[in-house]
Image (cartoon, rainbow, N blue to C red):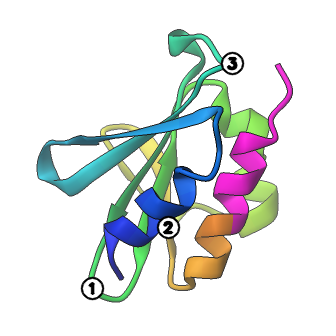
Amino acid sequence: MKSHDIEEYISQFSNLSVQENKGGRFKISHTNLKKRAGSLWFRAYSEKFRLYPTGEVISLLNLQSELGAPDGQDMERDYWFLENLKDVKTIIQAFAEVKT
């Protein structure tokens, strides 16, 4: 899996921006949400993606309902592993469609 696949997809949404942080982690921000409202993070691995929302994004996307129990926690944040790029894109699209 490649992070540029996600970056390219995000570029299709005018209300989303992406920023690479240390460790190959990418932060997806929604322009209509306040910074303190949270964001969606992802990291690409060779065979999967790890997604972890922060702040209000957790409830806005309702990931536990969509994806089931989290696969683990990192820095006290729940995360999910997704093996299918299509599933990752579906979540990103849902994030872009969040109404504020």
Q: Circle 1 is placed at which residue position?
A: 46
**Alpha carbon of mark 2 to alpha carbon of mark 3: how far?**
29 Å
* Picture disc at residue 59: none
Residue 81 percent location from the top left of the image: 48, 72
Residue 3 percent location from the top left of the image: 34, 67
**Alpha carbon of mark 1 to alpha carbon of mark 3: how far?**
32 Å
Q: Are marks 1 and 3 in contact (CB under 8 Å)?
A: no
Q: Circle 2 is placed at which residue position?
A: 71
Q: Nearer the viewer, mark 2 or mark 3?
A: 3
Seen at 65% across and 79% down, the residue is 86
Q: Nearer the viewer, residue 100 or 65?
A: 100
Q: Circle 3 is placed at which residue position?
A: 32
Residue 68 seen from this side: no
In the rendered structure, which disc, 2 or 3, sits on the residue that comes first in sequence?
3
Q: Nearer the viewer, residue 87 or 74?
A: 87
Magenta stretch in the rendered image: 90-100
Find residue 30 and report its image quarter: top right
Residue 96 percent location from the top left of the image: 72, 42
Q: Main secondary structure of the magenta part?
A: helix
**Alpha carbon of mark 1 to alpha carbon of mark 2: how far?**
17 Å
Residue at the limit of the structure toward the right, as seen here:
99
Task: Report crowding for label 2: few under 14, some 14 to 19, many 20 or more residues within 10 A (C-alpha).
Answer: few
